[in-house]
Amino acid sequence: MKPSIVLYKKLPADLHQRLEEHFSIVEFDGINEGNRAKVFDALQQAEGLIGSGGAVNKELLDHAPRLRGVSTISVGYDNFDVDELTRREIPLMHTPTVLTDTVADTVMALVLSTARRVVNVAERVKAGEWTSNIGADWFGVDVHHKTIGIIGMGRIGMALAQRAHFGFDMPVLYNARSQHKAAEERFGAKKCELDELLAKSDFVCVLLPLTDQTFHTIGKEQLAKMKSSAILISAGRGPVIDEKALIAALKDGTIHAAGMDVFETEPLPKDSPLLCLPNVVALPHIGSATHETRYGMAACAVDNLIAALTGDVKENCVNPQVLNK
Ligand SMILES: NC(=O)C1=CN([C@@H]2O[C@H](COP(=O)(O)OP(=O)(O)OC[C@H]3O[C@@H](n4cnc5c(N)ncnc54)[C@H](OP(=O)(O)O)[C@@H]3O)[C@@H](O)[C@H]2O)C=CC1
Ligand SMILES: O=CC(=O)O
């Protein structure tokens, strides 16, 4: 008999079939209040779990006594209780690398669209405001040659530095826990303390994972250290930025603008003050959302689950200490 798995995200047909060759699938459209009881019921028999979004916590794991492998269709895994998975010796698999370039492209799009006011200006054209030669009230600011500060010089930070350095001739500053020699050698990046990066950067790009240590890394105090002409880009996880403090800073001119792909609450509530600010570009968490990359992530996650349940994990494991036990 094939092992049973719970799939909680729709997959392309060929990837679904690939999973079916190995496993008996019980499928759900996400895990939510409406289907939680049914998911918990299916988890009683499940040896594998694959999908994205929603909390995979102790309560859920308590309903999954036979679970041997979990695969998320994402690189971020802040919604998983990794300690609990590790305690149960269950490998958690994720999808790094396959999405790196696409997310870096999205960050660069936010840099350009905030600096050149692409969204704001395009809306004015659609509203019929382009009636004569444009004046300074349509102008933006340059991106090329400006200093970019990257907070979180991991895979995506490196890909962003590459674009900024080679594409736009931008000096690169970065902050991370460790030194990234490759970034220094290839992109002339300079490691600095957070305060120095905030004070010197024209674009501050936050690409940190969400952890207990990174929660509200950017708050009132940090925003006050930025240049009043600076633009903040948030594309790691929403709660890394104190959104209330950011809204105040955008309103009172502490900083110039913000480009955001991630928010403290997602989907962004309709009454969020961010939606009324002309100096904000807000995207619906589309960092990796291209057809090619979303397919690549799903394929990677399927391969990851097969590897975890057949004991053949070579890469992409968040808690490798549980392997070969
Ligand atoms: N908007 C979107 O759609 C997407 C968002 N993401 C988010 O981006 C995050 C980063 O992805 P990726 O680049 O692949 O991850 P990496 O693990 O490669 O990079 C993370 C970086 O953050 C740094 N970091 C972690 N904790 C701290 C800390 N406490 N203080 C300072 N620096 C810290 C790491 O530092 P060090 O190098 O020193 O370890 C590393 O440089 C993901 O975790 C996810 O949350 C990812 C994909 C899409
Ligand atoms: O936010 C997306 C991810 O892959 O993490």
Image (cartoon, rainbow, N blue to C red):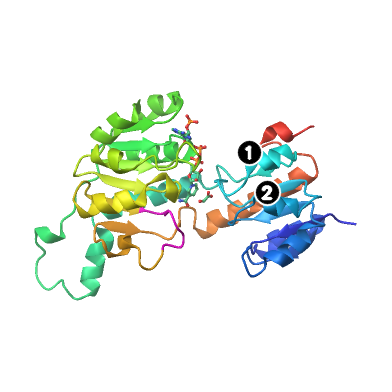
Cα gap from disc 1 to disc 2, whole angstroms: 17 Å
Which residue type carries mark 2? Lys
Residue at left offset 75%, top offset 34%: 323
Residue 270 percent across, percent down from the top left = 38, 68
Report the residue marked by disc 2: 58
- The one of 239 and 17 positioned closer to us in this rendering: 239
Q: Earlier in the sequence, mark 1 or mark 2?
A: 2
Whether residue 282 can be seen here: yes
Question: Local crowd at mark 2 within 10 Å, few (<14), some, or many (≥20)?
Answer: some
Report the residue marked by disc 1: 318
- The one of 257 and 225 positioned closer to us in this rendering: 225
Whether residue 27 can be seen here: no
Residue at left offset 61%, top offset 65%: 32
Which residue type carries mark 1? Val
Residue at left offset 79%, top offset 51%: 47
Q: Main secondary structure of the magenta part?
A: loop
Q: Is residue 264 magenta?
A: yes
Q: Secondary structure at mark 2?
A: helix
Q: Which residues are magenta?
A: 260-268
